[in-house]
Every structure is written in C-alpha cells, then in structure tokens.
Image (spheres, helix red, strand yellow):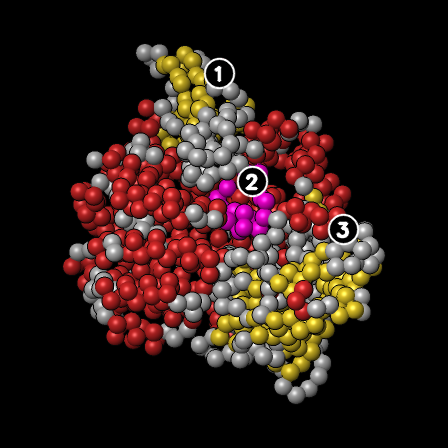
Amino acid sequence: MPGTNLTREEARTRAALLHVEAYDIELDLSSAREGGTFRSTTVVRFTATEPGASTFIDLVAPAVTEIVLNGRALPLENFSDSRIALPGLAAENELRVVADCAYTNTGEGLHRFVDPADGETYLYTQFEVPDARRVFANFEQPDLKAAFAFTVTAPAGWVVISNSPTPEPTGDGDTRVWTFEPTPRMSTYITALVAGPYVGVFDAYENGAQRVPLGVYCRPSLREFLDADAIFAVTKQGFDYFQDKFDFAYPFAKYDQLFVPEFNAGAMENAGAVTLRDQYVFRSKVTDASYELRAATILHELAHMWFGDLVTMEWWNDLWLNESFATFAEAVCQAEAPGSKWPHSWTTFANQMKTWAYRQDQLPSTHPIMAEINDLEDVQVNFDGITYAKGASVLKQLVAYVGQDAFFQGVRAYFKRHAWGNTRLTDLLGALEEASGRDLRTWSKAWLETAGINVLRPALEVSADGVIESFAVLQEAPALPAGARGEAVLRPHRIAIGLYELVDGDLVRTDRIELDVDGARTEVPQLTGRPRPAVLLLNDDDLSYAKVRLDAESLAVVTEHLGDFTDSLPRALCWASSWDMTRDGELATRDYLSLALSGLRRESDIGVVQSVHRQIKVALELYADPAWRETGLQRWAAAAETSLREAPAGSDHQLAWARALAASARTDGQLALLAGLLDGSETIEGLAVDTELRWTLLGRLVATGRADEAAIDAELARDNTSSGQEHAATCRAARPTAEAKAEAWASVVESDTLTNYVQEAVIAGFQQPDQRDLLAAYTEKYFASVKQVWETRSHEISQQIIGGLYPAYSVSQATLDATDAWLASADPAPALRRQVVEARAGVERALKAQAADR
Ligand SMILES: [Zn+2]
C-alpha cells in the first residue's frame, strides 16, 4: 500500500535519535458491536539525543483529532501518509495522540469478527510486521522497545486479555474499564489485545518456587471441542525443556494461548498472550498429523518468548533467524522432551520443512537466507520458505556442525548477555564460536549469504564380487534459476551416510558414518573394502540441506522397497528425493505414481501419507502428460477407493484415504459412493462422516455437477457456523458453470467486502483443475486487474488474490507469454513482480515435467 512503508535507513536514523520510555494507551472499544472506528489515545514518553531535531511517529487511522507534543498542540495536518511529523523535539518528550482507528476484517491490526453461532463480536490484534500503528500511534520498529500500559474500555461481560495479567475491571453500566499493569520493555509488534465474550480454561506451570499462570481461550461456540488438557500438557513439556536448555526462567508474568477466528498465520508470539488460528480447535476428527502440527506450533510460539520477545532482532533482516530458531526449537523439543508424543519430529521436519525449502529455493525469487530487507514491503513478502524452512534446515546443519551441547551453551550465554535487548546475527554467531571453538565466518558466508541447493551424489566403484573399491561424495553447485540473486557455491556439509540391508523384507540400517563433506569431491575411505549394502543413503538423519541422489542400485532397491525401511526418517528422505526428481523432470509422473502407490502400502507415518497424497495430486494435475493425465487420475482415484476400503476401521489412514478419494473421485461409481456416504445410504465401518468430512464430500459432488445450490444451502443449515459459511463459499465457487465462476470472480476481484477467510474460501473453490475450460477466460481478466488489486488492497488480501487466482492450471506457453507481456508492460512494484514471477515459475516447471512424462 502506498504511504505505509518505512525504510531501514529511516528506522536506523530514528533509533539513533530516540530512546522510548513508556506508552500509556487508552482504547475505547465500546463501539465494537457496531464496528466502524474506535477511539485510541496514546501518551508516549521518550528522550531525544539531539534536542531541536525532528522525527515522526507511525499511525494508520481514518482520523486524528489531537496531537500534543510537550504541552503544545501540533496542527492535525502533521498527520499524513501514515505518519505524524514531530518537529522541535526536547531532550525529554511527552507526546499525546488521539485518533479514530478502524476495526478490520483482514486479520491485520484490530480484527473484528461476528460469530454467526451466537451473534457476538470477537476482537483480536495481529501486529507483525507493522500493524500496531493501526491501533495506537507508536514508533513501529523492533529496536525501539518500551513499556506498554493498556487501559481498555469494553462491553460489560467481556473478557479482555493483553500481555500483562488481566486486572479486575471497574465501572458499571454497559461498559467496564480494564487497567493493565505496564509490560516489561518490548517491541511494538508483540503487544496484543484480545477482547470479547471468549471463554477460558486455566492451569499453572509449577517448577519449585516458580508458578506461571496458564490460560487457554476460545469462542463459546468452540468450547465443546477445546481439549485444553492436551494443550496444557504440551505447553508444560515446552516450559520444562526450554527453561532447562536456555537456562533462563520464562520471562513474562503469565502465559495465555488464545484460539481466535479468521487468523491469517498459524499463530503469533505476542508476549504472554499467544494467538493461534482456531482451526486448531478441532470440530471433527483429524489425524494425528494435525495434533502434531498443533503441538509444534505451541512449542514454536513458546520458544519465541525467549528468542524473539526477550531478545529481539534489531531489524527485519534477521527475521529468518527469529523464525528458524523457533522452528528448530519446536522440532528438537518434540524429539527430546520426556513424554513427547511425537519423538519422530525430524521425520516431519524432513517431510514438510525441507520440501517447502527446496521448492522455494528453486524459484526465480530465491535469495540468500540473509536477505537484504530495505523496507517493510521487502519483509512482508519474505515470510517465505527461505525464511522459515531453509533457515531452520540450515540451523539444524549448524547444530550438527558445532555439536548440540555447544549450540545450547552458546544460546544460554546469548540470552544472559542480551536479555530485553536487540541483537544482530553476529551476536549469536559470536556466542556459538565462543562455545564451540569453531570459526563460523566461512560457514556463515557459504550458507547464509548465498542461494540455492547443492546436489550430493555418490560415486562408487564395486568389484565383481560386490566389494566397494572406492567411494566418494560429489557435490554440485546449485542450479540457480535465471535472474536469481547470489552466486552458486559449494558448501561445507556435515552429513551421515546410512548403510541399509534387506532383512526378512525390511530395510534396516546396519551402519552409519558421519563426516564433513567439502568441495566437489570428498573421498570416504571408511567404506572401501566393505561389501556393498542394498542401499547407500547420503545425508541420512537429514543433518544437511541438499538434494540427494541415489546410485542406480540403491535407487532400484528403494523404488521397490521404499515402504520397507523400518525407520520413518530414511523413508521420508527417499520420498523427498523421489518427489524432487519428479518436479525436476528426472522421474516421469507415471513412474512416480507407481513408486508412490507401492510405497504407500507400508507407510505408517500419517503426516508423510498425507503429504504424498497431496504430491500425487499435484503431479497428476500439473506434471503429467495431458494425453495421459486422465488415465493417471483414474488410476489414483481407484487406488484411493481400494485403500479406503482396506484401511483399518477408524484409523487415521482410513480418514486420509477418504479425503483423498473425496478430492479425486471421477467415475460414476466413485461419485455415487461419495453421495451415499453423505446421505447415509452407504457406510464404511469406522469412518465417521462428520461435519468437516461432509463438506469435503459435498465439495467434490458440487464441483462435478452432482449436487446443486440447494444441497449447499441444506448443508449450511446443518452447520451454520463461520466454518460452515466458508465451506459453503468454497462450494458455490466450485460449481461447474460460467455463472458461478463469474460470481466468485466478481466477489473477490471487483468487490472488497469479503473477510480474509471467506475470500480464501472462494478462491479455493474457484480454482478447479477439472474446470480448465471454464477458467480459460480468466487469464486475461487476471492480468487486467492484478495491479489494481495490489495497489488498493491490504497486504494479506492482495497476496491471497495474486497467488490464488493466477492461472496455475493453465499449463501452456500461452500462459507464460501472457505473464511475460504483463511483466514487460505493467511495471509492477518489486513485491508484486515477485509474486507473479513465482506463480509463473510453477507453470514453467510444469511444462518441463510434462515433456519429461511424455
Ligand atoms: Zn515464529
């Protein structure tokens, strides 16, 4: 959006000039039920190093009614372009700003939601990256920390939660006033406010003399589904593990976790008041993978209380470190905490984080982990697979490189040294160098300042009688896409090599060698003279970040026996390898399908099963030769039906296969089965056709023309909740008619009234691979409107549209040409260009993969 940017240079200048003491913030939310605007009064006290100098404070608001600096009223015209100019600073300053701020429905700032289940209004804030300024005037940059004291007026009977513990409200009549204690010194982006008739469940974390009150909140309409005990159990494991590893007591007064509606991200690490998307309160049966993901999110946010909140990045260029640390911490805690239900978390990490990172790192927009973040627009498109997933993968490699004990020793010193302050990457690396004695400058340059993925390949010679005569690891420089930033380099890799043998039909590891790989060729003398095992697996245990290729004999064994590894991690590595070979056109889609159907027969890890299901669907819709695609889709749907019928009753696998069939059913028989499950005339033992599964079944029937609008209305009548409304919006947009597509398009592109969640639901329904003919007309419309969308909508909303409505299923040279013509003529801003270029790369890759499948 124009006028809301802030450059790094401006932030530097402001930080050098100011020291912010404290904010008193009064918010009058008595208008919350009506919406519109609310009164926001900020009093901020700060010092300036150069009396007489000028600066500005940030505010995004429809109107300002009062600006008083050091007792002197400033003209209201000083407020323009989301800033208030502050001339003539004194050494010590007090500024008072009164504004009318707006409730939002985009999940940014102060989000306002009305629950159709009870008609009540629910509010929450989401401030990262720069949206605290939508609620109160502030110096919006992470290194201007301060104490924040909130005073909130809200309807009587409401619950109000912030970073400090909730006080007893005062007053009478229709409203009450909550006066919160000041927070410790923190950044603006982790302050928070949640208000509404939410309901809470309470517990405490106790450890010796320490007692931290714990709360878990959601809307009343979700209360019956809130399994607070399970959430508290994971939270307490996290407290135990992190306090021990960090050697630093939890730094805030209490720890609330609030499940809030229409939340854009997974969760947000507001200090002591974490918000999480409320799909994590499960209304219907979900697989264990969903519980695992929720637990990981809980631990991720908890780790941020130290790394991010207690010690905070100076500027957004270190966002990657913030996110990578929390992502690494969630996985290592799951893997090691006593009583953890998900000790196989590194399998999930390999399966999800690595796959995400490898995909992102091959896009034309890829960049070094240490990205140049010159302004807020740069950072907002940088919540990507490099920042989260590659960063975390490289951090895992760093831990392998320095050793885990030295790593945590360095982290402990870092927290003690920088508590309540701001840091740069060098502060952490310095602490790790001291703890480990390893020089990290070369390491950091190779891993953090360059882009792309190295390929590791085995080179071996085996004698006629099966003895290894030589073995080396070959490293290739990344194949950087055209236009990508950074140079392609070889890197130091700490890796393990696994040796596997077939024993009674199982692939079991018989030995493991750990070594440093450096340069183009690293000899492995430890392997010479030994009999060649059935499978030699590079990067076993997934220590490093690299594409791995198998030698021909290992590949043949894995193709036949992928499901037979007794450990889930090598299976996940082989799944990942076969998937990226498919994406790279090195494995034909039809061969990938055969391999996957064979491997899935024995894959026990439900998270991996669900990932493979998604990957198969992508491969068939995008990477298959169009002439063969229908054959492949039929084969897949038939396999899904058979597997559904054979899966153990009531198992997670049964549910996963039911969803896979619901997403891919094509024949009359399969579609009749979906209809039968929905109306109850068909049953499958152990399969609960509950609220969420009903919508999934109906969605497919609607998209194939087997169910009409009346069926959607009837389903919504059964489930008239916010989730029900979103599913209904998806179904309506999925109808196979030109009118339905036009209606969906208009509601998203030509109007701006949909909430973030309903818009996302409409886009999901609109894009149907089986409806390529109906969608063809929208390529031109997309390019005609995308620039205006970017210029007029909020960041979250425009990002959904730009990525979501790109003609991704129209895999053709014509789509590439249309994209190129637009890029050449539209002169898009860098952040918009990046999003379109990333979408284009998907079509280009699909064209190549289709050629390989031919
Ligand atoms: Zn995070």
Is label 2 within 8 A of ligand 1 (CB to nearest ligand atom)? Answer: no
Residue 110 at x, y percent in the picture: 57, 67
Does any portion of residue 326 appear in the rendered image?
A: no
Residue 255 at x, y percent in the picture: 65, 61
What is the three-letter code of the residue carrying label 3? Leu
Which range is magenta? Answer: 369-386
Up-down: is 738 above or below 117?
above
Spatial separation of the CA atoms under disc 3 and disc 1 = 56 Å
Q: Determine which of the numbered discs, if any, sits on residue 17 in the image.
A: 3
Residue furthest bottom as drawn: 173
Discs 2/3, front? 3
What is the three-letter code of the residue carrying label 1? Glu
Question: Label 1, on which residue?
Answer: 523
Question: Label 2, on which residue?
Answer: 371
Write down the quadrant of residue 414 in the picture: top right
What is the three-letter code of the residue carrying label 2? Ala
Identify the residue at horizontal 43%, vertical 16% (top origin). 471
Does any portion of residue 20 appear in the rendered image?
A: yes
Badge 3 element: helix
Badge 2 element: loop
Residue 666 at x, y percent in the picture: 20, 55
